[in-house]
Image (cartoon, coloured by chain):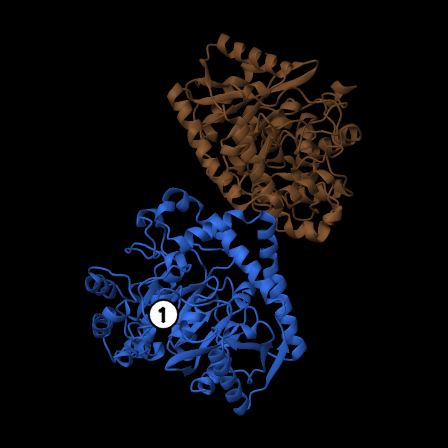
Chain colours: A brown, B blue
Amino acid sequence: MPTELLQASSLVETARRLRDGDRSVAAELDARLDRLAAVEPEIEAFVTEDARRERVTAAAERLPDGPPPERPPLYGVPVGIKDVFHVDGLPTRAGSDVPPAALTGPEAAVVERLRAAGAVVLGKTVTTEFAYFHPGPTRNPHDTAHTPGGSSSGSAAAVAAGEVPLALGTQTAGSTIRPAAFCGIVGLKPTYGRIPTDGLLPLAPSLDHVGLFTADVDSMRLAASVCCDEWHAVTDPRAPVLAVPDGPYLEQADSAGLAGFERAVDALDGAGYTVRRIDALGDVETVNGRHTALLEGEAAVAHHDWYESHGDAYHETTANLIERGREVSVGALASARASRTALRERLTELLAEAGADCWLAPAAPGPAPEGIDSTGDVVMNLPWTHAGLPVASLPAGATDGLPLGVQVVGPFGADERLLAWCAGIEGVVADA
Amino acid sequence: MPTELLQASSLVETARRLRDGDRSVAAELDARLDRLAAVEPEIEAFVTEDARRERVTAAAERLPDGPPPERPPLYGVPVGIKDVFHVDGLPTRAGSDVPPAALTGPEAAVVERLRAAGAVVLGKTVTTEFAYFHPGPTRNPHDTAHTPGGSSSGSAAAVAAGEVPLALGTQTAGSTIRPAAFCGIVGLKPTYGRIPTDGLLPLAPSLDHVGLFTADVDSMRLAASVCCDEWHAVTDPRAPVLAVPDGPYLEQADSAGLAGFERAVDALDGAGYTVRRIDALGDVETVNGRHTALLEGEAAVAHHDWYESHGDAYHETTANLIERGREVSVGALASARASRTALRERLTELLAEAGADCWLAPAAPGPAPEGIDSTGDVVMNLPWTHAGLPVASLPAGATDGLPLGVQVVGPFGADERLLAWCAGIEGVVADA
C-alpha cells in the first residue's frame, strides 16, 4: 500500500484555512495526529514520544486568540522539527545514544521564529546520528523498501506523507536537498547564515545550514519568509538563464539520475528556458576533499566534549568521523574554510561569464537507494553547500516509481529570487 | 638619565583633579603631550603619529560639558591603547608590516567603554608583531638598555614613564603581567572574557585577554570598574591566605627572580599573612605544551587570510608561529582547549584543599633581560593564562636596579576580590 502513504499537503493552503477560520486549530491538529497514527507504523518519521496529543493541545491553547486578520502567518500550523534543534519541553536526542541530559540548550532561534509565527510543534523528527550518516528507522513513503535519504530523514518523510505541511532539517553536506529529492517534495537550503543556527547541535559550524521542507514552491516561499533573516518578497522576475555544470561533477550522477536530469533539461528547453552547458567544477574532487576535511575537522571540535564523555555511545560511522577529524591539521582546516568563499566567487564569476542566472543540477546521483542502511550519496550537493549558495530541490519526474529531483542553485543571498524562479521551473520539470 | 624617565602617575588622582576641575582637560593633555615630547625619543612607547595634538584637542572638545558632579569617571583622562585594538580615526598596525588597510575593523568594545567614561585616546602604543614575540623599538624606562617586556611593550613603558596614567594591553601568554613587572607598575589580566575582545585583532581567541596597566592598585580598581563587565565594588575582605605553587613551576624562575620572590614571601609572612606552600603544577611542562599548541593552532586560523595575502610581510618569529600552527591537529587543538577548564578546576580544588584564597608567584622569571631583541620569557604566566584566572602583577622590590614583580592569581571571576586583596599586599611587597 505504498501509495496511500503519499499525501503531501500545501503549507499555503493549510495556513490559509487556519487563518481564515475555515478549519479550527483543534480540528487541524486532530487530523494530523490521526494521520500520524495511520502512517507512523510504516514510515517512522517522528521520534517516539508519549503524550503528544496533550502537549500539542496545550500548545494550541496558548496561541493568541485574535480574529483572523490578526492571526500570524502560520497560525496553528503543525510543524516537524528535526531532532537536532533544541525545542523547549522536548529532549534533544539527535539520533544518538548519548544521554539527552548531555545535549541540552536553549530553544533554537528558528524554532522560536516558527512559534512566533503561530506554528505548533507536532514533534521531533528522526535524524541520522548527529546529522551524519548512521541511519535512523525512517522509510521512504514512496516505497518503504527504500531510504528517505538523510540526514533529515524524518522531516522529508513527514512532509511527503502529509503528517505536517512544513518541517525543519539541516544541511552540512546534502542533508536537506537529497532527502527532499528522494521523497518527491521541495527542499530549501538557504544561503549560509540566512537562518540562524543558534540552538542547533553543531556538526560543522562553517557548513551547517538550517533547511526547510514543504510540498511545493509557493509553500516554501511562505516558510522561508518566516524562517529567514530579512525576507523581502520579490515579484516574479524574468525567466532565468540556467547553467548546467558539465564535466566531472555531473558525471558523478548515475545513469538513471542522469537520464532523468536530461529529461528535465529538455522539458525546460521546450518550455522556452535558455539552458547553457558550462565546463565547471573540473576540480570537484578537490572541492569534495576540502569539504570533507572541513566537516571532519569541525565535527571533531564540536563533538570533543561529548565524545570524550560518551564516546562509547557513538556508532562506528560517527566515531570514525570524529577520529578522522582529530587528525586534520589546523592548516588544512583553515585552507578548507577559506576555500568556501573562493569557490563561491568562482561559481559567481562563471555564471556571469556565461550570462546565466543560476545553476541547474541533479539533486542526487539518482533515486533513493534500496534499503535503509544507507541514506545515499551527497556528491551532487557538496560544492553548493561548500560555497554556501542557496539551493532548492524540486521534484522532477521519476524512475521505476521513485522520485527524482533537480536542484536550482542561486546567487549568494538571493534566496528570494531563487524561489521566484523555482515557482516557474517547478511545473515544467515536475513530470519530466 | 634613566631615573628621569620614571614618573608613573596615579589614575585615581588624575581622574579626581579633572573631575573636580582642579585641572582643566586642556592643561592635563598639554602636560602629557609635553611629557611625550620629553621621553619618547628615549623610550618609544607610542606608535609615531602626526597631528597628535590636533586630534587629542579635538577629542577633548567633544567631551560632555557638564559640571563636575556629572562628569564621567575618567573625564578627560589621557589613555594609551595597544596597537592591536581598533580605534576609530587611527590605523591599526599591530607592529606589523601588513598594510593597515588589511587590518581594519569597528572600534574595540573596551575602547568604546573608555571613551564613554570620558577618556581621551592619546595614541596607540607599541606592540610586538601581532602581539607575539617579534619586538618593537620600545625601551624600559628603568634602564633603556633593557626590554620593557612584551607584547604590550609600549603600554607598560608609557604608564611607567608617566605619559599616561592608564593603558590597554592584551595577554595571550604573558603579555600584560610580564611587562608590568619589568616596568615596575601594576598590571591586571582579568578573568577570561571579563573584558570583551571585540575589535581586538585576534592572536588566539581561546586565550586572548584584554589587559590593563596603571601605577597602583587603587588606580587599577578604577580602571577595571570601567573596563570589566558588571563590576561590583567590594569592601576590603579579610586578608587572604596565599598559596605558593612549589615544584617545577616555581623552579622555572631564575636565581635573582627567585630570591626576590622569597623576599616578598618573607615580607608578607612578617606582615601577618598566612602563606602556604603547595605542591602544584607538577605537570607544568604538559600545561605549557598544551598552551603552546592552542596558541599556535588558533593563531594559524586567526591569521590564515592575512598570512595567505601578506605572508611576506611577516617577520620570521611570527611566520614560524603560523607555520607551526598549521601542523597542529584538530584533536590536539580540541584537547588543549578543553584542558583550560580542567586546569582551572584543578587549581581551584588545590586552593580549597589548602584552605587558601589565591596564588602567589613571581610575575616573570627575573628582571627585564638586557637588550630589546627579546621581550623575555612567559613561563611564569602560562598556567594562569591558560586557566583564564584573574591575575594582578604588583611591583615587589628590585635587583640590580631593575624592578621585580609578584603576581597574585584569584579565583575565576573574582577580579573584584583579587584587587581588594592586592590593595593590602601592594604596600607589603613594594620594597621587599
Camera-side residue: B190 or B350? B350
Q: Name the residue under label 1.
A: B147
Kindly tell me whether residue A356 is visible in this rendering: yes
Name the residue: 65% across, 39% down.
Answer: A120
Residue B165 quadrant: bottom left
Camera-side residue: B117 or B250? B250
Q: Indicate the amino acid at tag 1.
A: Thr
Name the residue: 58% across, 43% down.
Answer: A328
Q: Is residue A46 above or below residue A237?
A: below
- Specify whether B99 is left or right of B219: left
Q: What element carries label 1?
A: loop
Q: Position of residue A377 (x, y in %)?
A: 64, 27
Q: Where is residue B24 in the image (x, y as percent from the top left)?
A: 23, 75
- Specify whether A325 is left or right of A344: right
Q: Position of residue A325 (x, y in %)?
A: 62, 43
The chain holding disc 1 is: B
Q: Where is residue A218 in the image (x, y as percent from the top left)?
A: 54, 25
Image quarter where the C terminus of chain A lies is top right
Q: Is residue B218 above or below residue B106?
A: below
Q: In this view, does B68 lie above or below A233?
A: below
Name the residue: 70% across, 35% down.
Answer: A29
Kindly tell me whether residue A413 is visible in this rendering: no
Image quarter where the N terminus of chain A lies is top right
- Specify whether B166 is left or right of A395: left
* Neighbour tally class for label 1: few under 14, some 14-19, many 20 plus, Cα within 10 Å: many
In the rendered picture of this protein, how many numbered marks are placed on residues? 1
Name the residue: 40% across, 62% down.
Answer: B110
